[in-house]
Image (cartoon, rainbow, N blue to C red):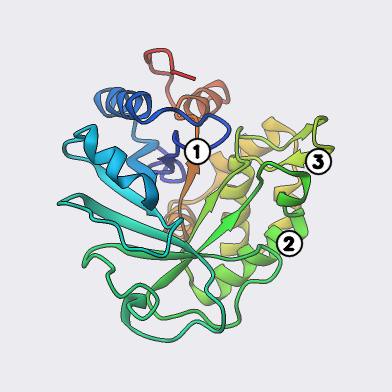
Amino acid sequence: MNRLFTDLVDDAGLFPPTSLPMGDALARHQADQAAGSPVLTHRFLCPASRVPDLLRHEPGDIRLGLIMDTDQPPDLDGLTVELVELKMPSGALVPGPRGERLVPWLPPDARLFVEVPAGSPPAQVTAGVGLKVRCGGLTPEAFPSTHELGAFIRHCVRDGIPFKATAGLHHAVRHPDPSFGVYRHGFLNLVLAVSAAVEGRDPVPVLELGDPAELVALAQATTEETAERTRDLLVSYGSCSTSTPLDDLAELGLIPRITRAKESR
């Protein structure tokens, strides 16, 4: 499979607009693990405030991405935490190994990602810390422009900063949303915009592409070296649906289609 798409999609089924109950979210996650698509990271994103609920459901062996929505460190009770994501703290980021000064209780093998606005990435990032960018949300104002997102991508590529993306990336290709009066960013646009920046090209025109055929051609023309560097930088993105990304990529002919159980909503 094309390296651009392996381990791309984190499971954000607990989050809007899907907002699955914990039991349903875990059942879907387990079904995805059984199906084993290489596009999915098989990492489960969970707010820190809901860790007690997660533990009550006895999740078993689960790879966790922890979203900090509280100042209190959760009792993880043996859970394997791979990622910790939090909002940008007040003041400048303090240099330090792995960001322990930001999160003193950071699990030893976890990576830390700090959410920042697309249009104003920090001038300096704590050593060992990645960034997180929001590509949409529940209001029109939550959607960054292609120029803001492009500036964020250029910043990360220039400085070698790994990043994650979240929210709004519901389909592969950029498309209008009449209910919000905005264009929704496509996750395929995002991936290929990072590839463009890696090769020294402007990511904005790629973010603005709405023609699936053009995007498919770009994906198929991406060299292995560029794909590897792209995914070193773009670690993953969170999706409340784990079937739609697979369906979209299969429809575009970029991955094989697999048979999956119908996704709970």
Crowd class of label 3 (few under 14; some 14 to 19; many from 20; radius 10 Å):
some
Residue 232, percent from left and from top: 42, 60
Q: Which mark is residue 245?
A: none
Q: Which residue is mark 3?
A: 182
Disc 1 from disc 3: Cα separation:
21 Å
Residue 69, percent from left and from top: 46, 55
Residue 98, percent from left and from top: 33, 75
Q: Which residue is mark 2?
A: 148
- Looking at the rendered structure, the kind of residue marked 3 is Val
Task: Please state which of the two labelled residues, at mark 2 or mark 3, is closer to the viewer.
Answer: 3
- Closer to the chain start, of discs 1 and 2, is 1
Q: Which residue is mark 1?
A: 15
Contact? badges 1 and 3 (CB < 8 Å): no
Mark 3: secondary structure: strand
Task: Please state which of the two labelled residues, at mark 1 or mark 2, is closer to the viewer.
Answer: 1
- Looking at the rendered structure, the kind of residue marked 1 is Phe
Q: Is residue 1 left or right of residue 185?
A: left
Q: Quadrant of residue 105?
A: bottom left
- Closer to the chain start, of discs 2 and 3, is 2
On screen, residue 88 above or below 9? below
Q: Quadrant of residue 50?
A: top left
Disc 2 from disc 3: Cα separation:
14 Å
On screen, residue 93 above or below 38? below
- Looking at the rendered structure, the kind of residue marked 2 is Glu
